[in-house]
Image (cartoon, rainbow, N blue to C red):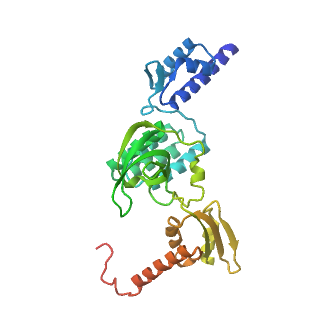
Amino acid sequence: MAEDDDRIRSKAARLRRIEHRLYNTPAGLRVSDMAADCGVARRTIYRDLMALHTMGVPVWEDRGRFGIDRATYLSTIRLNLNEAIALYFAARLLAHHSDEHNPHIVSALDKLAAGLPDQTISAHIAQAADVVRARPVRADYIRTLEVLTRAWADRRLVLLRYRAPNRASTEREVAPYFLEVSRSTPAAYVIGFDRLRDAIRTFKIERIEHADLLDEHYVIPADFSPYAFLGNAWGVMDDAEVSVHLRFSAEAATRVRESLWHHSQRLVERADGGCDLLMIIGGIREVLPWVLGWGADVEVLAPPELRAEVATHAVRMAALYRDENSFSDVRIGG
């Protein structure tokens, strides 16, 4: 009996290994490769492939190579209560972040809700799916995202027609290295090597007018790390490093202390109850709206260009509100 249990466990582990290897090898594997990897005879691998097929794994075969159809593959995971809560938080963030009806988000949340045993958590995740489902459909955006997803997964180049703000559209052959979402706005980005610029560039997916998958494959350089690339970015744009020095009022300081805003941050307490926040970040473009959101409770001490931008916005806002009677005829809701 013990030998049978060991054999079952060994087969189960081998099936998981084969399934994992097949899924992560888009071009497929030969039976001889899998047999050598698992240390078993080729006839055993043939039986294992049949077992995976019987279990519902979408195994394909083409000229002696076997693989898994990623488009129809469904993974199985088991979660404890605390892990389920972690995914619940992720689902809530996903619902907040998505400003369109993304059917893949809806489907993923529906499946996650159906697979969780805790009814309270699963019900709230199902409601998060309903929130996304009720939003408007943007078919062109979904198609572009699907093309980029396939290109990134299969390491294939993609031809983009991209429209930067206030510029004419350009065609780019791009090798996607990473897909990223903005933490502050409902937006997604693809980071990759752009042949037109001969450099790594960041493209906002909402600005991609059209995307076509190309047959040419690429290799992500071994020394490229998206986490290092985005290490100093406030969001997804990694511009030249700048040292930022912000002075917060006592009224705002409590909220500032509650969060880690950037991994480089350093807080300096002030005698008046306020605090100074010092950071080294990649450029000021993305941090500017966040700074403006604090209104008069923050003063920019550095860098000068950020201080000037905030001052310019302050002057424009003061001009808007200078004449208190300018909006006297406006009625909210009618």
- Quarter holding residue 263: bottom right
Q: Residue 175 appears at what percent x and percent y?
A: 46, 44
Query: In the picture provided, is 315 more to the left or to the right than 166?
Result: right
Q: Residue 51 appears at what percent x and percent y?
A: 51, 18
Q: Residue placed at 48% from the left, 31% from the top?
A: 26
Q: Quadrant of the N terminus?
A: top right
Residue 110 visible in this rendered orientation of the protein: no
Q: Is residue 22 above or below residue 303?
A: above
Outermost left residue: 334
Q: Residue 113 appears at what percent x and percent y?
A: 48, 42
Q: Residue placed at 43% from the left, 47% from the top?
A: 129
Query: In the picture provided, is 186 more to the left or to the right than 16?
Result: left
Residue 45 visible in this rendered orientation of the protein: yes
Q: In which quarter of the image is the C terminus?
A: bottom left
Q: Nearer the viewer, residue 130 or 211?
A: 211
Q: Which of 295 and 141 is in front in this view?
A: 141
Q: Residue placed at 39% from the left, 39% from the top?
A: 214
Disc tally is 0
Query: In the picture provided, is 85 more to the left or to the right than 128?
Result: right
Q: In this view, does 133 lie above or below 269?
A: above
Q: In this view, does 196 lie above or below 325?
A: above
Q: Residue 229 appears at what percent x and percent y?
A: 57, 53
